[in-house]
Image (cartoon, rainbow, N blue to C red):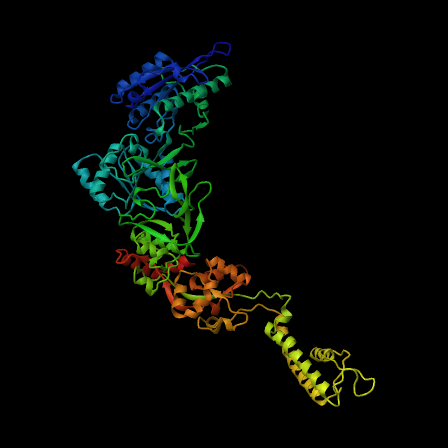
Amino acid sequence: FSLGRPFGFPTPSVNVAVVFSGPAYQTEIKGRLSRENFMDLPLEVNPITVLVNNTNPRALLTRICDTLSTNRVHGMVFEDSIGSEAVAQILDFISTQTAVPIVGISGGSAVVLPYKSEGSNFLQLGSSIEQQINGMFKVMEEYNWDSFVVITSLYPGYETYVDYIKSFTDTSYFMWDLQDVLSFDMSADSLNDIRARRLLQQIDSQVLLVYCSHEEAQYLFSLATEAGLVGPGYIWIIPSMAVGNPDIPPPDSFPVGLISIITDRWRMSLRKRVRDGVAIVVKGVKSFRKQRGFVPEVHSDCHNPVKTSATNDTLFRHMLNVTWEHNDFSFNSNGYLVNPAMIVITLDRERQWDKVGTYEMGILQMRYPVWPRFGSYLEPVSDYRHLTVATLEERPFVIVESVDPVTGTCVSNTVPCRRQSNKTETIVGHTEPYTKLCCKGFCIDILKKLSRTIKFSYDLYLVTNGKHGKLVRGIWNGMIGEVFYKRADMAIGSLTINEERSEIIDFSVPFVETGISVMVARSNGTVSPSAFLEPYSPAVWVMMFVMCLTVVAITVFVFEYCSPVGYNRSLVSAKDPGGPTFTIGKSVWLLWGIVFNNSVPIENPKGTTSKIMVLVWAFFAVIFLASYTANLAAFMIQEQYIDTVSGLSDKKFQKPQEQYPPFRFGTVPNGSTERNIRSNYPEMHSHMVKYNQKGVEDALNSLKTGKLDAFIYDAAVLNYMAGKDEGCKLVTIGSGKVFATTGYGIALQKDSRWKRPIDLALLQFLADGDTQKLQT
């Protein structure tokens, strides 16, 4: 560059060459660009339209160099669409020789130019292969696709692609399993076909990452179809260059469900992309002019390379941080956008590229479920290697959490799951009647391990029409109903194996031993204000002081009144002149004083019969007070105690009304526990119905607040809840004593082809101690 005009001169124009090499020019631009196309830019723009043919490199180089020398170009904007990689490499060379900044506006060359020439002034609005790989792994992490194979052609940059993937997996906290890397020539040739088929037949992974060109991808997918590696059971992920032009229908060999990550600029019109590229050049020139006071003149001789100096790259430096129309065009030292906005696309059943997610600034937001094989909610899936799995929240076996509020994704130890919602949610421009959640827990760990061991993928959802499963008016609900009516291939959770369920579905071998247990609460040791009354029931107190005392007082009075040695039927005066009278009130006062052993002024009866009656009352009062005092100590000095229950046949369960107060116990309805009690103890079941709880958490709160005396449920769940209870207020009787022992199993459709593989895998987990490790 050389010095330009100072500020005293009129505002200069900026010469920008706009290079077109693709077919989009004929359909969208249709003619040469003019100054009127860029009137809203801060400086006057003189656009120079250049049409090049990328089939002749020599003619291309001559055409560009002539344009630079003739028009004194300040910057160049290039439509680097897919297929123009050769043009991009020549332009990169020219930018190095002349120091003319070049802006690639379509991103097609970003993948194949991972390393530019030294001194290159090539800026690209697309995403680099490293950035696309980061997005690919975000998608794989979201769906727990941890095991994969890499397939590459010998296309330039494939070694960089493989090296970056290996570096990424080695340094990531996520447990990636790179099974193999297959690199081979993907040109149509009989020898290549034989080798390629042999390599593809060795693949034993469902997730395949591919690096190749658009033409090579057609060849690869044709061979993969012959090898049986396409279909809903396989997940293919390709870079943007293999997609080609997303606006053009893909080749017939591309499989439905194919995934790619591309720049979000693909839906923009070519005019809009050109305008953004020109704006970056103009804003850079304006920034340079504002700082230096002049507009730089360019070196435009391709035959005499410019010498590198601080001045030569000044305009390029001013173009590295540009904001235009609220868009951040910041570039890194390699000329790529620092935070490119990318989108996740998939090939749908209509063979159209469908936007299903966005990836920007390291944050992935996905529409879920997105892959065409999943179908709509509860729709049967035809793919035999992809299973629809129903589950139910119940800690610690299945724990449900919300997605990350910022990213909308699940953390690494959870898997996405969905729950049907009454409202519709709009995610990535798509409306779905579901709520996306994240599931984890022991059963989810078992499911993930099974999927890796016996090679299947799955779609997990939470049942909303019941609990575990109960027959209601001839219709099964819950997880059992989902499997029985073939809305789900499998159900996993705290699902107890019993005879009634086994008649309509198949169960795997048990992977957790369980049964029925009883949970009670410890007494908290506090003394209630009415504790002094607790030694006797309200009925005893009423009988004592309302019935007994009154009857005895009347009896004593009658005996004394009728006695000739007593008051001799006189309420006015006694036998001795001036003696006191003996009324019924004095009789009651006498008996009260004897009961409480208090030395108060009293008047004793004179008659023998009434005296004997008073002695009997006194003897009774001694027994009453002794019994009361002994029990009062136990009730007033409370220590923590546990209600002792020996089992389901205990008298407290079988005859709860005979207890004082009546024994209150319940369970969660619609489960195997309730069914077991209803079948074997009908009277016990009829009593507990009014104390049944909505869920385990509600039952625990009822125990702690004293609304429930005992909670009957699955032993495995109760033992976990007792272990994590704060303050250890809840305990299971007999240190986890179990009745009606059974186990949790995985529910499968009758005669399912998956039963034997799952049984063998679960038995292997038990033998290797993997199940015990997951439990702890």
Q: Is residue 678 above or below residue 264?
A: below
Q: Is residue 90 left or right of residue 604?
A: left
- Please provide percent x and percent y for residue 347: 29, 37
Q: Quadrant of the N terminus?
A: top left
Q: Is residue 221 left or right of residue 657?
A: left
- Please provide percent x and percent y for residue 207: 30, 44
Give the residue drawn at x 44%, y 40%: 407
Q: Is residue 695 above or below residue 55?
A: below
- Please provide percent x and percent y for residue 5: 47, 11
Between 564 and 375, the residue placed more toward the observer is: 564
Between 226 and 556, the residue placed more toward the observer is: 556
Give the residue drawn at x 59%, y 74%: 539
Question: Could you tell me if residue 752 is visible in this image?
Answer: yes
- Please provide percent x and percent y for residue 608: 71, 90
Q: Is residue 306 above or below residue 719?
A: above
Q: Is residue 340 left or right of residue 752?
A: right
Between 133 and 407, the residue placed more toward the observer is: 407
